[in-house]
Image (cartoon, coloured by chain):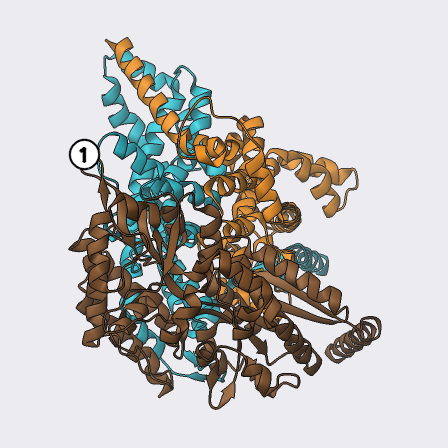
Chain colours: A cyan, B orange, C brown
Amino acid sequence: MVSAVMSAAEPRAVRRRAWLTNANAWLLLLPAVVLLATFTHYPILATLYHSFFSLSRGGASEFVGLENYTYMLEDDVFWQVLRNNIVFAIATVPTSIALALLMAVWVDKKMAGRSFLRLAFFTPTVLPMIAVANIWLFFYTPNYGLLDQFLKSLGFAGHNWLGDPSTVMSCLAAMVVWKEAGFFMIFYLAALQTIPPELKEAAEVEGASRWYFFRRVTLPLLMPTTLFISINALINSFKLVDQLVIMTKGGPNNASSLLLYYIYEVAFTFQDTAFAATLTVTLIAILAAVALTKFVYLDRRIHYQ
Amino acid sequence: MRQQGHSVETIAAWALALLWLLPVAYSLWSAFHPSEYATRFDLTAPLTLDNFARAWNQAPFARYYLNTVTLVTMVLAGQLVVATLAAYAFARFRFFGRDVLFALVLVQLMIMPDVLIVENYRVISALSLLDTIPAIALPYIASAFGIFLLRQTFKSVPNELVEAARVEGASSFGVLWRVFVPLAKTTYIAFGLVSVSYHWNNFLWPLIVTNSVESRPLTVGLAVFGAPETGVDWSVITAATVMTMGPLLLAFLLFQRQFVQSFMRAGIR
Amino acid sequence: MKFKTKALLTAGLMTVASLSASVAQAVDLTMYYPVAVGGPVTKVIDDMVQRFQNENPDIKVEAVYAGNYTDTMTKAMTAMKGGQPPQLSVLFSTDLFTLMDEKAIVPIDEIPGADKEWLNSFYPAFMENGRAEGKTWSVPFQRSTIVLYYNKDAFKEAGLDPEKPPATWAEMVEVSKKLVKKDASGNVTRWGVEIPSTGYGYWMLQALAIQNGQKLMNEAGNQVSFNAPKTVEALQYWVDLAAKEGVMPKGAVEWGTLRTDFLEGKTAMMWHTTGNLTAVKEGAKFNFGVAMLPAKERRGSPTGGGNFYVFKSATPEQQQAAVKFIRWMTAPERAAEWSIKTGYVAVTPAAYETDVMKNYVKEFPQAVVARDQLEHAVAELSVHDNGRIYKIVNDAVQAAVTSTQTPQEALDSAQKQSERVLSRYK
């Protein structure tokens, strides 16, 4: 349309106006464009660029082609953190969504003390992950941690929750579900409030059970929200690593390490920024795939506006 | 029958809610009681502020508070200005490259600065800003989320209002300031609350770019303080934890409705 | 346009530089400092720094605490790459090769003020990790060995002689079995012994390997022997303490909370750094003893802890000021004071000849065990790309103690990964 406006047949005044509009708009956008380019677009491209170079210690960087990528594919730890991340996503995303839905349904009903319920469910959302990790670390501490004390009072043996590779992931996932479910509840709550009450009344007149109504009417109507939350939860599962710094440092034996944490470790502890860039490319690719699915596929089929 | 179903559900809901509050309740218990009660629950246990005093004396928490407050203020102020201008351009101007540019903005929704730590560190260091509060803030100042949210709001402003202001002789900036900004008040509040809670709680990036007490925010200060190697006892660590989350928790309890509605508004489009 | 900005900037910078040069005579030093054990270590350091500054008003030292050794090394390296290196730091003595490869540090013995006589006044065992290519690169400060802490009351309770801590591997198992206590339902309420497997797992493994007569690395720092039969045997012994003998909890034992375990009576013995001694002394509500680690083929412990390094990017004035500071910090009286306040080994024999130290040792003989162990001590594991290698060994240790892999599998994998990393340095 801009080119149409610019065509020579138009009078000069119109062209001048169009030019002014353009200048005006770009001026307004300048700060955002500069900042986004510096801290999002340039870093994405630079990551890709640096992944083809190797940085010898204290020396200059040299082009190595795909060597970093071969190294990555041969790196057992890389595969493990990738696997962990998938497990972590599978463990946290559906659980927190299911709980969030349950919470929202409860809070939406005229239940005794519903504002207290909403408060209780939502509170973890506003707490810093670092603080949460400190508290939960103590829950899981063997022997005198809260969980072990509780189990011991019931006569069970204590367990080294975070020190055992077979339990550490579940423990961290439980904590993340606790932290996130209330946040997702909010979205469901908003969606539930848009369902017209007449629907429900009609269903009750026809004698449909509450469960039937929920399954056949509420759930389908909530589908767009569910997808929206799933995407968000999925992305979160790739960028939530604060808890690892406090609770496990990715251990034992990388059993709880996640991709972003591994990147942090490689880049800043091992000072191997070239390999870290290569790992980051993988992470960006995953996030981009999620984003593309969302924009291209989901947005076309579902309208949540 | 139905009544009974309801009460079972009510009990279940309450049970879950209490379970959900347990970690917070526990941290308060342990922070306000002497350390020998950290793992023993006894209603007659004496209350004390001693743990807070010790945490406060063992690490420069006052400075951390100042840093965090400076940080969230700086981020929010920057975000509001940048996002308002950009959203106005996107919502009200037809210009060359608008759609491409908007798509480029949206890239940040998916690939947030949080994952670009390696390259952003290089950028910050090239700007010689390492170990400063602006270094923590800068990557977040242009918020795609904020731009997106405000653009939606600005688009819903009725044209008549704009025309009326134009007739009165307002410049395009005047229109923005006198028509759009006041009408987007709730969006600003919503975005503000979400942004403040995000940046109050943010950790990994500040951990990477800060070294000294002068720039460390609360979360990083807490992590350095609470590292088990320092061997501080649990009660003192929980006291520090409560101090870190306290202001936000308090604000949330006081303005619960606004918080929930803001998060709701910010999440739905 | 571009030129103008540049010129302006340069002019501005020059003004700032000349201003600061004329105003401040004082030399500013930033020092990164790692905190690896309990107790108010930062307070002790701050206090010593303050006193140094009072005596030397022309030097200002700012101590930056950034967590444990790994965190501090991360911070120092990151800051250096970001163009803001510290002028001096206390870092793992074993990070020497990494710091040399990064061209980060200068040899201390090339800085005026650091003479041979001074450098020879330290315990030779502590100097080992600081020497390479015929030069001395670092000066010991926060140094330790691993010692065995044991609960004398628990020994008495179990009918053991509280003055006779276990001296061999076999004895340790035997004693531990007697020390394990269970409640009515058969759950363990007190373990016999705990060896920490997080954080510094490589260090503990090295201790066991030394005792079994195995060295873990070569002098050049580019070869390791993690899957040597004797190393595997050492790890097997460690794993068996939990899996076979049932005297140690299964799974990873936390370095950070182990002291609390010991103080709360959850374990009767622990292996830990002597740097924890003063904190244990202050926290223990029971009688406790400190002993050298038990022997298999021989006694032994790696040395451990941090040395002072001076960074290359510091100006000559800063480097000299740094040496002045280091000399002050390691002088016999201060080394004695530091040792008393923390439990770390005082780094010079002269420190043990001071009156305060003599008096302290008289009342608290546990304080010299770690020093006496020095004659059996071996240089700590130190190779190129040290952080990475430590992580690989720590992972292997954790894989073994959590029974994810057998000691042989875990160490084979560690050896393979390490060789891959170290192949760059051959």
* The quadrant where residue A146 appears: top left
A189 w.r.t. C365: above or below: above
Disc 1, SS: loop
Location of the N terminus of chain A (image quadrant): bottom right
The total number of labels drawn is: 1
Toward the viewer: A121 or C271?
C271
Percent of width and height locating residue C319:
65, 79
Can residue C322 be seen? yes
Name the side, left or right, on which A212 lies relative to B106.
left
Q: Chain of mark 1?
A: C
Percent of width and height locating residue A300:
36, 46
Can residue C35 be seen? no
Toward the viewer: C301 or A181?
C301
Q: Residue at x 38, y 19 (%)?
A: A109
Location of the C terminus of chain A (image quadrant): top left
Percent of width and height locating residue B195:
56, 44
* Kind of residue at disc 1: Ser
Residue with the mark numbered 1: C185
Q: Residue furthest left?
A: C244
Q: Residue at x 18, y 75 (%)?
A: C229
